[in-house]
Structure formats: structure tokens, C-alpha cells
Image: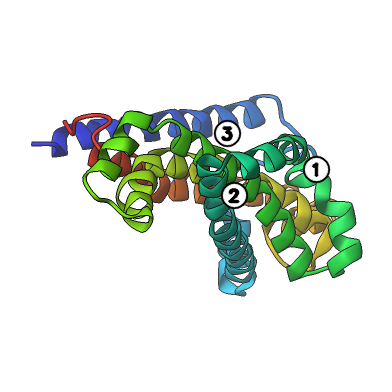
Amino acid sequence: MRRPGRIAGAAGFILPLLALLLIWEVVVRAFDVSPRVFPAVAPVVKAGIEAIDDGTLIRHIGASLGRIALGTLIGIALAVPLGIAMGTNRAVSTFFTPLLRFFSVLAGIAWIPIATLWFGYGFGAITFVIFNAVFFVVAYNTLLGVTSIAMPLRHAAASLGATKWQLLTEVLVPGALPNIVTGIRTGLGFAWRGLIAAEMIATNVGLGYMLFVARDFYRTEVIVLGMIIIGVLWLLIDRLLLAPLERETIERWGLVRAA
């Protein structure tokens, strides 16, 4: 029963992209835009085929996805326990809340210069930038999720004999999970942008590096190809992984009803 709705939703999502593709081709041809300013569709497609054939596109994509995965996992692994500790302990919250607010403004791209000094140019610096982009957003959302759980609910669980561990694993973490997943989705969006910026400076492989090198040789078709790949990858990650995870988490813990 959901299939027609899903097909309509997919069509509604794809059609604007196809319209943009058509407008792009028409404008480039109508105004005879120089390829050094902006390429037509055909050269971009050709550049993509060549990059796949020689393996460079796969190598750049693999490097970028590997960095984003590792940095995100480290950020989540450290942020969630901190957010829970802040939500359950007033002293921890009092100490870390000002730091969290201060560093959340600096998360991501602002760390690139010092990250290259600490870790050099390469995997470590970029992973650190991604970690920063994810960590503070997830920690803050975890804190919000834990503190949003009503005290009467906590007291009710305690009065029924729940231990501290049971209170944590069966009340606090499940109750905060929708906020945690939302934080992961938001933080990963920041991390993706930070990844591309860092790869332009701190490495010799990755999608950001591909864009940066193509600029030096005036290969606008490669630049546009890289931009399209970056956008498509993020759409796939968000729509196929993050959005369903967020939706299922919210439905699972009773904030909304599944349709």
C-alpha cells in the first residue's frame, strides 16, 4: 500500500534535479558559455566515465567515506556518554556546559589550521576535523534528550525497583535516543562540509582534493563532477540511512505513530 506513495515521493524528489539538469544544458548552449567558465553536461559525463575507468573517482570517494565514517564513529562514541553524564549529574553539567557552548561555535572547519599542525597533512588531521564537527552537536543533543525525560518518570522507575543501570539503559538512553539520532544527522551534515574543506588543504586524495587540483588546471568539468558526486553521496547517506533511522527511532519510542 505504501509503494505508490513512495514512487510519487521519489518522483517528486528526482524531477527537480532533472529540471535543473535541463536548465543547465539550455543556458550553457543558449549563451555559448566558455568551458573554462562552466561546462556543458556532456563533458561532465565524459569526465565521470574517464574517472571511473582509471579508478581515480573510486579512490577519491573511498578515501572521503572512510574518513567521514571513522571521524563520526569516534565523535559519537565520546559524545553520547558525555551528554548522558551531563544530563544526569549537575556538577558535570555545570562544568562542561560553558565549554560545550564555547567549542560548538568552533567545531569543524575552524580546527583545520591547528589540526594540520598537530597531525600533519593527511588522514589524522581530517579525521580530527570531522570528529569536532560531530562531537559537540551530538553531545548537546544527547544532553537535551536526557534532560527532557520527566522526573516523575524517573522516580516511577526507581520506585518500581529499577537499579541505576536499568534506569540508564531502559529509561534514559531510550528516551534520549530520538534526540541523539537527530544530533547525529545534524552533526554528520556539518562533518561532510568540514571534510570537503579539509581535503582541499590537508591531503592528496579525496573529493575535496579532486576539486582543488582540477581548479589549477581549469578543468571545470571535473570540478562540477566533484560537486555533483558530493551532493549525490550526501543525499544517499541522508535519505537512505539517516532519515529512515531518525524516523524509525522516533516511531519506535512513541513520539509519533507510524503511518
Q: Residue at x 45, y 39 (%)?
A: 146
Task: Measuring from the top left, give residue 110's x and y in whole percent.
Answer: 82, 44
Mark 3 neighbour class, 10 Å CA radius: few under 14, some 14 to 19, many 20 or more: some
Secondary structure under tag 1 reads loop
- Amino acid type for the residue under numbered disc 2: Ile
- Amino acid type for the residue under numbered disc 3: Glu
Q: Residue at x 62, y 74 (%)?
A: 54
Mark 2 neighbour class, 10 Å CA radius: few under 14, some 14 to 19, many 20 or more: some
The residue pinned by badge 3 equals: 25
Mark 1 neighbour class, 10 Å CA radius: few under 14, some 14 to 19, many 20 or more: few
Which labelled disc corresponds to residue 230? Answer: 2
236 up-or-down from 213: above or below: above
**Which of the marked residues, 1 or 3, is nearer the chain's N terminus?**
3
**Which of the marked residues, 3 or 2, is nearer the chain's N terminus?**
3
- Amino acid type for the residue under numbered disc 1: Arg
Of residue 123 and residue 7, the one placed in the foreground of this image is 123
Per the model, the C-alpha gap separating discs 3 and 2 is: 20 Å
Q: Quadrant of residue 208?
A: bottom right
149 up-or-down from 172: above or below: above
Which labelled disc corresponds to residue 197? Answer: none
What is the residue that sits farthest to the right in this orientation? 117
In the image: residue 231, left or right of residue 250: right
Per the model, the C-alpha gap separating discs 1 and 2 is: 21 Å
159 up-or-down from 237: above or below: above
Q: How many marks?
A: 3
The residue pinned by badge 1 equals: 36
Task: Measuring from the top left, give residue 131's x and y in whole percent.
Answer: 66, 56
